[in-house]
C-alpha cells in the first residue's frame, strides 16, 4: 500500500516548455486534489476532482489543466511553463468515510 | 465561499511550554476541521481532526477545541518538544463530500531547547 505517489520528484523546465505531473493513489479514494505551495505561503488549490469523471477549478487554476484518467490517477499539465509556476506541487486524495486528506511526497518544479 | 484565517504566523516557545494556534472560519456549513503538520521538505500530515458535533478532542499532548457559535477552533500542544518544530496548517471542509479543503496560511512553530 504505497498511498499517494507523485512523479517526478524534481523537474527543471525552460519557459514555454510543457510537462505533466503524475499522481496516483491506491487507497480507492474518490476525491483527488492538486495544490501548489510557495515559500512562506500555505497550500493553494489548483484543481480538484470530487469523483471520477468530474473536475473543478480551485483558487489558482490559470495556466494549468487536469485529467482524471481513472479512479486512481489524476494528472496536472502545464502547457506553457512560466517562472511564476516555480513551486512545490502536492497531490492529495480524500477518504470520504474518515474525511482525511492524504498528501503525496510533492514535486519540486523550477521554471527558468 | 469559505475563508479560513490562522494566527499567529510564527510562534516560538521554550521546550516544555504550551503552544496554541487559532483559526477562524466563515462558512457555518463547514463541519470538519483537520490540523496538519508539515516538517521542512516533507508533505503535510494529519495530526488531529474534529467534527462539528464535538467540542474538544485530545490525543496525548495534542488537543483541538471547536466553538461553532464563534466559528473558531484551536490547536493546543502541551509539554512541547524540539520535534514539534514545524509548520502547522488548519483547514475547514464539509464532511462526506469530495469538496475542497480550505486551508489557513500556516503557523511556523519553533520549540527552543
Image (cartoon, coloured by chain):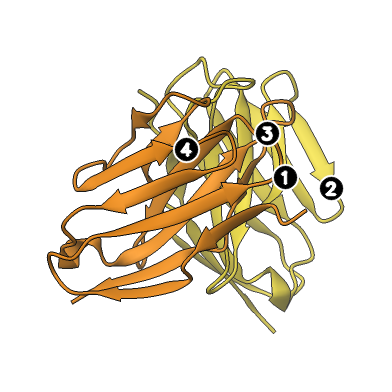
State the residue at coordinates (50%, 16%): B28
- SS assignment at label 2: strand
**Real-space Cα separation, disc 4 to disc 3, in angstroms:** 19 Å
Q: Upstream in the sequence, badge 4 or badge 3?
A: 4
Quarter of the picture containing the N terminus of chain B is top left
Q: From the image, tell me which residue sits under label 1.
A: B48
Q: Are marks 2 and 1 on the same chain?
A: yes
Chain that is coloured orange in the picture: A
- SS assignment at label 1: strand
Closer to the eye: label 3 or 1:
3
* Above or below, A90 relative to A93: below
Residue A28 % position (x, y): 69, 35
Give the total number of marks visible in the rendering. 4
- SS assignment at label 4: loop
Closer to the eye: label 3 or 2:
3
Q: From the image, tell me which residue sits under label 4.
A: A69
- Crowding around mark 1 (Cα neighbors within 10 Å: few <14, some 14 to 19, many 20+) is some
Task: State yes or no: discs 1 and 4 in contact (Cβ < 8 Å).
Answer: no
Closer to the eye: label 4 or 2:
4
Q: From the image, tell me which residue sits under label 2.
A: B59
What label does residue A95 carry, if any?
Answer: 3
Residue A22 % position (x, y): 46, 55
State the residue at coordinates (37%, 54%): A36
**Real-space Cα separation, disc 3 to disc 1, in angstroms:** 15 Å
Task: State yes or no: discs 4 and 3 in contact (Cβ < 8 Å).
Answer: no
Q: Are marks 1 and 4 on the same chain?
A: no
Task: State yes or no: discs 2 and 1 in contact (Cβ < 8 Å).
Answer: yes
* Above or below, A12 relative to A70: below
Q: Chain of mark 3?
A: A
Closer to the eye: label 1 or 4:
4
Amino acid at each position: 500500500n504505497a498511498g499517494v505517489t507523485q512523479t517526478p520528484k524534481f523537474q527543471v523546465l525552460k519557459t514555454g516548455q510543457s510537462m505533466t505531473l503524475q499522481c496516483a493513489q491506491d487507497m480507492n479514494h474518490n476525491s483527488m486534489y492538486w495544490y501548489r505551495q510557495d515559500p512562506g505561503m500555505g497550500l493553494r488549490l489548483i484543481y480538484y476532482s470530487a469523483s471520477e469523471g468530474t473536475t473543478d477549478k480551485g483558487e489558482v487554476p490559470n495556466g494549468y489543466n487536469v485529467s482524471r484518467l481513472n479512479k486512481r490517477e489524476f494528472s496536472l499539465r502545464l502547457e506553457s511553463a512560466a517562472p511564476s509556476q516555480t513551486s512545490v506541487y502536492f497531490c492529495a486524495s480524500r477518504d470520504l468515510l474518515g474525511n482525511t486528506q492524504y498528501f503525496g511526497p510533492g514535486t519540486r518544479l523550477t521554471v527558468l | 465561499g469559505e475563508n479560513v484565517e490562522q494566527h499567529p504566523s510564527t510562534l516560538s516557545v521554550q521546550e516544555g511550554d504550551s503552544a496554541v494556534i487559532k483559526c477562524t472560519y466563515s462558512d457555518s456549513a463547514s463541519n470538519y476541521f483537520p490540523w496538519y503538520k508539515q516538517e521542512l521538505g516533507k508533505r503535510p500530515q494529519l495530526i488531529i481532526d474534529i467534527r462539528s458535533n464535538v467540542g474538544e478532542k485530545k490525543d496525548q499532548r495534542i488537543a483541538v477545541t471547536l466553538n461553532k457559535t464563534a466559528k473558531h477552533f484551536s490547536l493546543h500542544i502541551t509539554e512541547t518538544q524540539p520535534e514539534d518544530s514545524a509548520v502547522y496548517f488548519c483547514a475547514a471542509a464539509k464532511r462526506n463530500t469530495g469538496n475542497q479543503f480550505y486551508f489557513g496560511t500556516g503557523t511556523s512553530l519553533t520549540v527552543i531547547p
